[in-house]
Amino acid sequence: MNTIGKFESSMKMMTAKMIPGFPTALLLFFLVPVMIPVGEAVWLDVPPTGTKCVSEEIQSNVVVLADYLIISEDHGVMPTISVKVTSPYGNNLHHMENVTHGQFAFTTQESGNYLACFWADAKSHGNKNVSINIDWKTGIAAKDWASIAKKEKIEGVELEIRKLEGAVEAIHENLIYLRNREAEMRTVSEKTNSRVAWYSIMSLGICIAVSGLQVVYLKQYFEKKKLI
């Protein structure tokens, strides 16, 4: 909560201090590449047998766009792969077989780890590893800014300002998401601690009751045997 408040205050102060003109444009050109999230390029070496997966924890209502392509030195025989993308709840979002390249895009419906798994088709390449290049983009990085600029007829500093606004919104949403996750984890931790405490109290009570019954039983036993 305090982190989000400080972030918003700092952004307001930074906006208030900006002076129209060249310094503002220069500042934006320096800030935009730093603050806007970029896509992640992943290189996978998939073995002849087995599966390799990549995953990312993403919150809900986020656009995900990814391209994958087989990199092969042998241009005569191009190996093929199969791809499957699943949501945190196991829903199938993308599934292709015997392909050399492809693309998948979706908007997340729930928060959690989204998994993309790749496996090679053994018949297409023998016993060699298959190299795959994956370009994974999420959120603002998945937006087609060229199309947006053309549609809304914006360019230059105005376009960079739009990118900066989107980056700030994405950071703010991530902070809120992290805060909510922290609250959920705190609630789970408190419930677990409460259950452990009650379990300990119950265990202690049962031990005391069993000990008392043992004492009563032994006393009655010794009295019957006239040992006490």
Image (cartoon, rainbow, N blue to C red):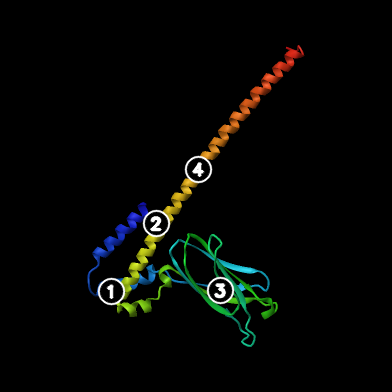
Is 147 on the left-hand or right-hand side of 81? left
Residue 28: x and y, percent? 31, 71
Q: Quadrant of residue 116?
A: bottom right
* C-alpha separation, residue under disc 2 versus residue under disc 4: 23 Å
Q: Mark 2 or 3 closer to N-term?
A: 3
Label 1 sits on what residue type?
Answer: Ala
Q: Which residue is mark 1?
A: 25
Residue 124 in the image, given as x and y percentages of width and height: 67, 80
Would you place residue 134 above or below residue 218 in this image? below
Element on which disc 4 rests: helix
The residue at which mark 4 appears reads as 191
Residue drawn at (44%, 49%), measured in percent from left and top? 183
Contact between labelled residues 3 and 2, with CB atoms less than 8 Å apart: no
SS assignment at label 1: helix
For residue 208, above or below residue 42: above
Using the numbered discs, state the Cα–Cα distance from disc 2 to disc 3 in whole angstroms: 31 Å
User: Above or below — where is 160 with respect to 88?
Assistant: below
Q: CA distance from mark 4 to mark 1?
A: 51 Å
For badge 3, the amino acid type reads Trp
Q: Residue furthest left?
A: 20
Q: CA distance from mark 1 to mark 2?
A: 29 Å
Whether the residues at callouts 1 and 2 have beta carbons within 8 Å, the answer is: no
Which callout, 3 or 1, points at the residue further toward the start of the chain?
1
Instruction: Answer with mark 3 or mark 4, whichever residue precedes in sequence.
Output: 3
Instruction: Nearest to the eye among marks 4 and 1: give it.
Output: 4
Binning the other alpha carbons within 10 Å of mark 1 as few (below 14), some (14 to 19) or many (20 upward) gives some
Apparent side of residue 63 relative to residue 205 in the rendered image (left or right): left
Residue 182 at least partly seen: yes
Image mark for residue 43: 3
Quadrant housing the C terminus:
top right
